[in-house]
Amino acid sequence: MHLNDDILLLVFETLATERNVDIGRRQAAIRYASHVCQRWRDLILAASYIWGRLVWVNRLQKPPWMREVFQRAKTASLFSVTLDGKRGGCRDSWMQEKDRPFNGFAITVLQNAWSRLEEVYISYWTDLYRRSGRDFHDYLCEQIRNPSPSLRSIVIHDWSEFMTKPLPVDSFNGSAPLLRELSCIPARLPGPNPWLSRITTLEFTPRSLEDIINAVSWAHDLKILRLGEYPHEHIFFRSEDYSKFELMSPIILPRLARIAGLGLSFEAFTALWSSRFMSPAESYSNICISIHETHITEGQDPGPSQFLTALFNFFYHHSGITTCNIHRYDWRWVVQADNTLLVIEARARSESHPELYMKLSFYCGHEGNYRIIMPFIARAIAEYARCTKYFQLNFVGNMIGYIEERLFGSLLFSMTDVESITVGYSPLGYYDELEDREGREMFTKLRTVYFELHSGMYDRTLRQAKAFLVRRVKSGRPVSTVHFQSNLSSEDKSKILRALEDVSGLRIMWGTQ
C-alpha cells in the first residue's frame, strides 16, 4: 500500500521539525529521503516549508549545499535558522579570509528571513574573528532592533567580550508578539519591555542579585529560568544580599531550572534555598560557594541549622530528592579537595534522568577557615551520599593531615552500599590508613576498582594498589575486577600484571567506565 502525498509530507515535516534531534541529522534525513525515489524527490524539493526548517549555516558543510538549502526554503512562510560560527582559535590570515564569506552568507540569511523567523539559534565567538567577527556582531545588534512578528524562540550564545553587555534596549523595536523563549549567553537583559513580559522560558547571565530579581519581575509569564555562566570569572553574590535573597526565594525557585557556573556567598546560597520548591524542568546546578569569612556557629545568621535546611531544600529542588528517597536514583559521586577547595559532584547515571546533575564547589581561599567548615560540610553531604554505589575521591595535600582533621571519615564510613570506586595516586593509601586508625572497614560491598593512572607508573603506586587488594582478600571481601585505562604502554601493562599476579581471584581489565 502506498502512502498518499499528504501523509508522506506530514512524515517529512515531522522529521524536519523534531527539536530534540540535532539539525544536522534532520537535514541529512530529509536529504537521504529525497534520494529514495523520484516521487519522494519531487514532493520534498517542492516543499519549501520543510526546507525552511533546515537552514543551517555552519563550518562543516560546503557553501554550495548550504546555499542550495536556503534557495529551496526562500518561499517558506516560516523559518527555523541555525547559525553555528564557532571554530578553533586560529588567527592566521587565510582563516580570516574564510571568515568573510561565512559571515556574509550568515548575514544574508538573517536579512532575508528575519520577518519570517520562527526560531533562530546563533552560536558564535566573535573575538576570534577580529574585524570580520566584530562586523557580524555589529550587524546582529542592528538586526535585532527590527520587529519580529513571527519569532517564537531566539538563542544567542557568543562567548566574547562583545556579548557581556546587555541586549539593545530597543530589541525587536518593542514588537515580538509571539516570542516566548529567549536565551542570551553571556549577555544581560536590556530592561522592562512588552515582549519580555510575555517570555515563558528565559536564559541569561546575571551579574548581580538585582539582575535575577528584575528578570522575575519583568517577565510576568516566566515559567522556566536558566542562569548561565560568565565565561571569565565566578560572580559571587555578596553576603549582604542575604535578606533580599531570602525574600525572593519563593518567587525565584519555582521558576529556576538550571544554574551553570554561578558564584554565591555562603549566606546567599543559604538564603536562596530557604524555601522548598521543585525545579520546573531539568535539574542542573553548578554552583561555586564562597566561604572566605564564614564561621558556622549557632546563634549567627545563617548558622548550621539554616545551612542544613538550605541543603535539604537544594536537593529537593532536584526532582524532589530527599534523604529518604535518594536511594532510588542511580548516582555517581565525585569528591575533590585541596587546601582551599572542596568540590562535591553528583550525577545521575540513569538515562531516565539525563539532566539531573549537582555540583557544589566550596571555596575558602588561602586565608579561609577550611579546617573548621569543611568537615561540617562533608558530614552534611554524607546524609545524601551514603546510598551511592559509585564513588570517586581525589585530593591534593598531606594524607595524614586529611585523616587528623577528620575531613572525610564520616562521609566514607557512611557509604555502606559502594560497589565501585575510582582512584588515583593518593586515595588507596588514605583508605588503608583511615581503616587502621578507625579500626573498621569501609566499602564492605566493593567489587570493582577503576584506576586513573598515567603512563610511567611508580613502584610505590603499585605497592599501594596491591596492599589495598590483598587487604580486601584477607578481610573476606575481595575485589573481583580492576580496570586500568587502555592507553597505558605495553611496558606498564606488563608491570601491572607482574605486580598483581598473586592477588587471588582478581580479573584485570583495560578500559574506562
Image: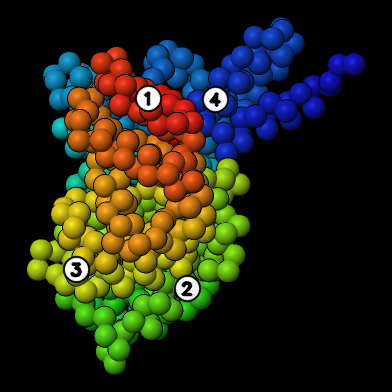
Residue 145 sits above or below residue 22 on the image: below
Whole-Å distance between the Cαs marked 4 and 2? 40 Å
x and y, in percent, of residue 501 in the image: 37, 24
| Residue to which mark 2 is pinned | 313
- The disc labelled 4 sits on which kind of residue? Arg
Classify mark 4: residues with Cα within 10 Å, few (<14), some (14-19) or many (20+): few
Q: Of the residues under marks 1 and 3, which one precedes in the sequence?
A: 3
Compute the Cα span from label 1 to label 2: 49 Å
- Considering the numbered disc 4 on the image, is that residue within a helix, a strand or a loop? helix
Q: Please name which of the two marks, 1 or 2, marks the residue nearer to the observer.
A: 1
Real-space CA distance between mark 2 and mark 3, rounded to the nearest whole angstrom: 24 Å
**Left or right of 146, for residue 124:** left
**Residue type at tag 2:** Asn
Q: Position of residue 166 (x, y in %)?
A: 28, 57
Nearer-the-camera pick, 202 or 257 = 257
Q: Which mark is residue 501?
A: 1
Helix, strand or loop for disc 3: helix
Marks 4,3: beta carbons within 8 A = no
| Vertical relation: 278 (above or below) 94 | below
- Judging from the image, the colouring scheme is rainbow
- Dot 1 or dot 4: first in sequence order is 4
| Residue type at numbered disc 1 | Glu
Q: CA distance from mark 1 to mark 3?
A: 42 Å
Is residue 365 something one can see in this rendering? yes
Residue at point 19% right, 47% down? 161
Camera-side residue of 48 and 442: 442
Q: Reading the chain from its start, which is encountered first: label 1 or label 2? A: 2
- How far across and down, in percent of the image, does residue 168 sit? 30, 55
Q: Nearer the viewer, mark 4 or mark 3?
A: 3
**Residue lying at 51% horizontally and 62% vertically, measured from the top left:** 318
| Label 4 sits on residue | 25
